């Protein structure tokens, strides 16, 4: 990124703005581009953006100031951010790590300026909680950070230079397949994919953002060097995380096109042992000192089957089935693994058939609201007005929630197929994939998936030779918890401050630019291809009547096996935290869990055996679960969650804007003022009932549930 001097370069700003049409809807993308070009957004640059897009300068500033990732002040030569969220704090980082770095470098967190050698800042979450504690240095994440962070800073300052810049993105090598039917067109694409030559042995390094943060790049380098030195017929691929973030860095071994096993916690110095064992047909990985699991019913090369491992045996991997097992940047591999088969079959039927299958599945919104997906699509299809839109909400800006990024990084074609099926069902001809601004790898992989799909005739005009057309566009967010609210997301796309709209009308009636619009969460859309392929009844039976299908969870905190898992819906926290995740680290008992992030609740261990169901006593919420060990400061955890909600309030409605800071003040008074608890609960109820959107309505829940379950932690009980 180019540094700004005393004034912004007008030439650089002009070049950044040149590609954008002169329309308000491009305001956020244009702000991104200008910040990338000059390092921040000085007033002069904002004025040029406003003039180019024909919006008032005050509104350009208002939009820029609404997003945490857009910078209105320059930063120092180096930029360090420390996560102070719940997961990182419980794992030994958080404010403790921030204060240690500030003391060691004689800095005040938050002070910035272009003349400073280093800007040190706190951040709420990096959304890679399974490898906590986390720190970001000059844009590169580093996970599992210990007490030696300050000693390693100078080395990390050169990390990006040592590992180089990404290669330029090539043009997709695909072309449309001409065939009489969509299924035949797809079959031709699959046949072409199978004809491509492949190495007998392939090593898929688990290079999701989590793996990269804990040494994945070093592992890839060691694997490539080792393969070259041995002259092996092998290929090393930068793959995706399969959800076992606790096992990173790791690699999947693929022999003759079949994933055979996962080698876990694979250090670069262990690569010679791995390659030595794989060089012979009977090479034993366990005997070579390597750990992992086999992807078969029986053992493989000394590794026990995954079905015998507690992390894997409790899962029902439908949406995560391909994650980590294929190259996420290869349409060919996705096609050979079954991608787009459901879309091809659907295009030979009626859109109503897709709606009927999804309705029978009971698929509910996986973003936390649990609204039936099929009802949205049906309402949009029936609504007057064109064009119609489908919007994928991949913002996922809630601390402690990171499952959607794993889906986007690990299997972008599954998500894209779900988007196209939703568009076909809802009668939409445009789809917008909205991805969090800091989800860099997810956005890159989604963009490449869209490019390959478009080149192959799977998106755009005449999808698979049919009459169905759907233009797919990618937009990037810039932070902001409120973007989880669907109408605030639409405001963002239109180039306005992200604030919820008053409803009705609902988006399916009047959404983007007043046209019917469906907004679905990433996980919701990712479930659709399997539902269409295997039937709604099959999917529904994987869960309970109140919670059909499967559910993804991001597990984090001081637990033995943090990561992203997929289980049958309606399960319990005990199954997630104690069986799959292995309980607290070092055998430390868990006394609670934070479920659903800042808009969720603190659930005591007494409720760990209660089934998680929508609107039940324990709800899965947005799919984040943070294990809380005995002795943890519950009041500080609640303060962290409540403080985030207060700062992230969009400010549109008074109960949320004014009520949450007052609730924080009352939290400080608990234990000193005998009436504070009653006043806090009364205020919380007012906020819940009177806030405009669901985010404000849920904001006080952590405090309410915390007081209920752990009154003594707040000085409010025995």
Image (cartoon, rainbow, N blue to C red):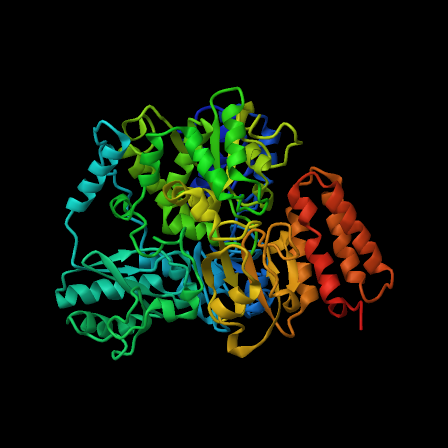
Image location (x, y in percent) of residue 474: 42, 36
- 230 or 550, nearer to the observer: 550
Identity of the residue drawn at 27% across and 46% down: 330
Image location (x, y in percent) of residue 426: 47, 29
Identity of the residue drawn at 52% across and 24% down: 382
Image location (x, y in percent) of residue 690: 75, 41
- 171 or 305, nearer to the observer: 305
Is the C terminus in the top left, top right, bottom left or bottom right quadrant?
Answer: bottom right
Image location (x, y in percent) of residue 403: 47, 53
- Side of 552 where 616 appears, left or right: right
The total of numbered circles placed on residues is 0
- Side of 463 where 500 appears, left or right: right
Query: Residue 537 lies in what quarter of the image?
Result: top left
Q: In this view, does 451 lie above or below 139?
A: above
Q: In this view, does 384 lie above or below 191?
A: above
- 696 or 591, nearer to the observer: 591
Identity of the residue drawn at 43% across and 48% down: 538
Q: Can residue 264 be seen in this view?
A: yes
Q: Can residue 437 be seen in this view?
A: no
Query: Residue 640 lies in what quarter of the image?
Result: bottom right
State the residue lying farthest toward the top.
385
């Amino acid at each position: 990124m180019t540094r700004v001097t005393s004034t912004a370069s007008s030439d650089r700003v002009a070049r950044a703005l040149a590609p954008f049409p002169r329309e308000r809807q491009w305001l956020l993308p244009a702000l991104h581009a200008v910040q990338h070009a000059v390092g921040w957004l000085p007033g002069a640059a904002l004025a040029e953006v406003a003039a180019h897009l024909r919006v008032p300068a005050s509104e350009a500033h208002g939009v820029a100031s609404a997003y945490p990732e857009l910078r209105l002040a320059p930063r120092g030569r180096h930029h360090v951010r420390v996560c102070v969220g719940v997961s990182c704090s419980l794992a030994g980082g958080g404010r403790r790590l921030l204060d240690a770095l500030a003391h060691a470098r004689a800095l005040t967190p938050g002070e910035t300026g272009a003349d400073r050698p280093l800007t040190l800042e706190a951040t709420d979450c990096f959304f890679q909680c399974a490898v906590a504690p986390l720190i970001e240095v000059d844009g590169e994440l580093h996970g599992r950070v210990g007490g030696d962070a300050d000693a390693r800073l100078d080395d990390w300052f050169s990390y990006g230079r040592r590992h180089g810049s990404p290669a330029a993105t090539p043009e997709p090598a695909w072309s449309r397949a001409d065939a009489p039917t969509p299924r035949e067109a797809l079959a031709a694409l699959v046949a072409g994919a199978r004809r491509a030559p492949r190495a007998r042995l392939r090593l898929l390094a688990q290079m999701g953002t989590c793996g990269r943060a804990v040494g994945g790049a070093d592992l890839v380098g060691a694997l490539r060097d080792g393969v070259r030195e041995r002259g092996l017929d092998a290929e090393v691929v930068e793959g995706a995380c399969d959800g076992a973030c606790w096992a990173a860095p790791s690699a999947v071994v693929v022999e003759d096109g079949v994933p055979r096993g996962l080698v876990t916690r694979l250090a670069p110095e262990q690569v010679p042992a791995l390659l030595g064992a794989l060089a012979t047909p009977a090479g034993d990985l366990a005997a070579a000192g390597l750990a992992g699991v086999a992807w078969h019913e029986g053992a493989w090369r000394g590794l026990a089957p995954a079905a015998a491992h507690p992390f894997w045996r409790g899962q029902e991997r439908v949406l995560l089935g391909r994650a980590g097992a294929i190259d996420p940047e290869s349409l060919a591999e996705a096609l050979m693994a079954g991608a787009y088969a459901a879309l091809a079959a659907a295009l030979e039927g009626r859109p109503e058939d897709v709606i009927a299958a999804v309705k029978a599945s009971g698929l509910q919104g996986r973003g936390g609201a649990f609204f039936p997906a099929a009802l949205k699509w049906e309402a949009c299809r029936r609504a007057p007005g064109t064009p119609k839109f489908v919007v994928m909400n991949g913002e996922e800006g809630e601390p402690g929630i990171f499952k959607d990024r794993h889906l986007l990084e690990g299997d972008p074609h599954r998500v894209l197929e779900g988007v196209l099926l939703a568009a076909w069902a809802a009668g939409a001809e445009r789809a917008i994939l909205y991805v969090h601004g800091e989800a860099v790898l997810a956005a890159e992989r989604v963009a490449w998936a869209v490019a390959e799909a478009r080149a192959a005739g799977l998106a755009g005009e005449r999808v698979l030779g049919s009459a169905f057309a759907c233009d797919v566009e990618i937009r990037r967010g810039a932070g902001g918890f409120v973007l989880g609210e669907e109408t605030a997301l639409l405001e963002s796309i239109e180039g306005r401050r992200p604030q919820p709209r008053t409803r009705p009308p609902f988006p399916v009636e009047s959404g983007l630019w007043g046209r019917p619009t469906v907004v679905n969460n990433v996980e919701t859309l990712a479930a659709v291809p399997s539902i269409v392929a295997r039937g709604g009844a099959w999917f529904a039976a994987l869960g309970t009547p109140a919670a059909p299908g499967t559910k993804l969870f991001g597990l984090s905190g001081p637990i033995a096996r943090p990561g992203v898992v997929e289980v049958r819906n309606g399960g319990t926290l005990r199954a997630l935290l104690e069986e799959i995740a292995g309980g607290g680290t070092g055998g430390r008992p868990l006394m609670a869990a934070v479920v659903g992030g800042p808009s969720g609740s603190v659930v005591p261990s007494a409720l760990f055996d209660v089934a998680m169901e929508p609107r039940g006593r324990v709800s899965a919420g947005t799919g984040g679960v943070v294990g809380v060990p005995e002795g943890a400061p519950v009041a500080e955890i609640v303060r962290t969650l409540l403080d985030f909600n207060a700062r992230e309030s969009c400010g549109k409605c008074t109960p949320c804007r004014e009520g949450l800071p007052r609730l924080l003040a009352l939290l400080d008074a608990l234990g000193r003022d005998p009436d504070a608890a009653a006043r806090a609960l009364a205020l919380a109820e007012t906020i819940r009932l009177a806030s405009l959107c669901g985010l404000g309505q849920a904001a006080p829940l952590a405090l309410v549930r915390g007081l209920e379950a752990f009154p003594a932690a707040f000085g409010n009980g025995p």
